[in-house]
Image: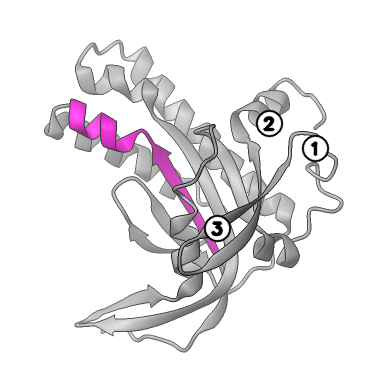
Amino acid sequence: MEVCHTSKQSLILIPDISGFTKYVASCNIEHSQDKIALLLEYLLENNSLKFKISEIEGDAILFYSYDFPFSAAEIISQCQLMFDKFHQRIDEFKRSKCMCESCQNLYNLSLKFVLHFGQLGSVMVKDYCKLFGKDLIIAHRLLKNKISSNEYILFTENFSNQFPLIGTHLDNHTELVNDIFNLEDIGDIGITYFDLKALSLKNRQGTTC
């Protein structure tokens, strides 16, 4: 039986597939579930920093770590790796030239990330140990926001305080956007985000950010 623990300082990473609901609603369930499973497996296979996996939530994976000997640059590079591999997998489906609705609509899917740092507790539900706490709620609530882009990395002020951007390739990135989101029952949360597709494209072209 899994054993729960007392609350610990934790790094939270959630990659989330945008367009998932529309995709599932418009496609044959047998075909679409196979494609989504393969995309999620690709994210799991490219978990190079070896985050723990709490849950696979249909269109998202809840990664976390109680040990975080990583720099901000390493964590952001982890997100970029998952992002690039996600789109690489979609391109592989495209090259198969399958004309079924499930394959054609894959190209409308995109990927975004939320990074947060805070306290995670846990609670036993029958034989299952479930993560628990305000910071888990914050991370999930930030997946639904007013950002117009569908492909970005969003990190909270808590994350930035623990993993400073100073000295990283994002330190002087002119497209970093700072904002404050008000979460009902929680309050104001300071966040920073940037367009992940634009950054990945610059990196592929060898452009310094």
What segment carries the magenta color?
A: 12-26
Q: Are marks 1 and 2 in contact (CB under 8 Å)?
A: yes
Rendering coords of residue 31 (x, y %): 17, 29
**Of the image marks 1 and 2, the number of the one nearer the N terminus:** 1
Based on the picture, tell me whether residue 186 belongs to the magenta stretch.
no
Q: Identify the amino acid type marked 1.
A: His
Based on the picture, tell me whether residue 25 belongs to the magenta stretch.
yes
Q: Which mark is residue 182?
A: 3
Q: Is residue 76 left or right of residue 45?
A: right
**Of the image marks 1 and 3, the number of the one nearer the N terminus:** 1
Label 1 – label 2 distance at C-alpha: 9 Å
Quadrant of the snapshot with the N terminus: bottom left
**Of the image marks 2 and 3, the number of the one nearer the N terminus:** 3
Name the foreground residue: 191 vs 131: 191
Rendering coords of residue 63 (x, y %): 46, 60
Residue ID for mark 2: 199
